Image (cartoon, helix red, strand yellow):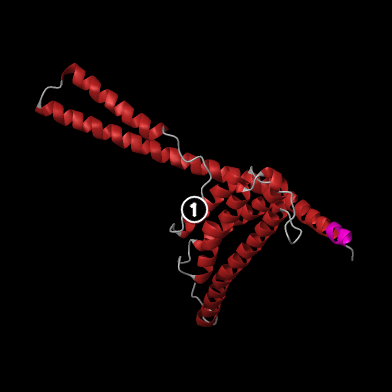
Amino acid sequence: MSEVNVKVERALARFDRVTRALDERDGASREAATRERQRLNRDLGRRLARAGVAVGIVSILTIIVGLIMPIGMFGFLAAIGLAIGIAAILAFIPGQTAAKAPAADLPNPQMVQRFDSYLYRTRGALPAPARAEIDLISGRLPALKQTLERVESLDPKAQDARRLMSLHLPGLIDRYLHVPQEFRGQPDGEGLTVDERLLDGLAAARTALDEISEELARGDLVAFETQGRFIKSRYGEQQIDG
């Protein structure tokens, strides 16, 4: 097969993969956006709660000082100003806006949430085929989070997933974003462009996460089957009195 035919076959295979991904992209993208809004709302709620606590502390201290010694109108106004200032700082200081890979020491559920947020925040800077792969990965994260919540962080499969989410996949995306735009279309020694290597890396990571999720879920299935067989052997022949 000629080099031209090889490239055509490769392009067609990639097109088929991308079009299949596009069929699922819209739903996964919307769900990722919804999860990101929920995370932002929770963060805002926590900051508002901290602001309320700070105002309460200032109010209590003002009352205590007022009981010990007169503070006068100016002292009262100063206390109000201090409380408003602290509340404004705690409630309205900008949160994290830049995409940041999850820290390696986070618990499993928080690791998945931070990774989900990282993918959502970096998605827009990637080419369309890569965005389709990102959407496919994001669509699998809720189920992975549910599984990892019941698994210890030191579990070998959980460790594999954690390394992918905190180190390898963010490293791939960050390194891609560091490559200037004008160099991304140049083929390397193996004939692959930067965009193509990104797509291949994302697809490989998605496959790895699928395999890890399947193996972790298999443990739950085995435990369920074992419990079912035990109940059948223990109670299956017994009659329950009405």
Q: Residues within 10 Å of mark 1 (few under 14, many from 20)?
A: many
> Nearest the camera: 190 or 19?
190
Please state the total of marks drawn on the protein image: 1
Q: Report the residue at 48% width, 70% height from top.
A: 155
Residue highlighted by disc 1: 102
Note whether 226 is above or below 60 in the view shown.
below
The spot of residue 197 in percent (x, y) is: 69, 57
Residue 145 shows in this picture: no
> Nearest the camera: 107 or 2?
2
- Judge from the rendering whether residue 76 lies leftward or rightward of residue 166; answer left or right: left
Note whether 124 is above or below 71 in the view shown.
below
Q: In the rendered structure, does residue 1 fall within the stretch colored magenta?
A: no
Indicate the secondary structure of the residue bearing disc 1.
loop
> Nearest the camera: 15 or 189?
189
The spot of residue 202 in percent (x, y) is: 65, 57
Q: Report the residue at 56% width, 51% height from top.
A: 116
Tell me where the magenta segment starts and ends, as one range: 3-8
Most extreme residue toward the front, as rendered? 189
Q: Identify residue type, mark 1.
A: Pro
The spot of residue 99 in percent (x, y) is: 53, 45
- Judge from the rendering whether residue 138 lies leftward or rightward of residue 239; answer left or right: right
- Judge from the rendering whether residue 220 lies leftward or rightward of residue 82; answer left or right: right
The spot of residue 109 in percent (x, y) is: 48, 56
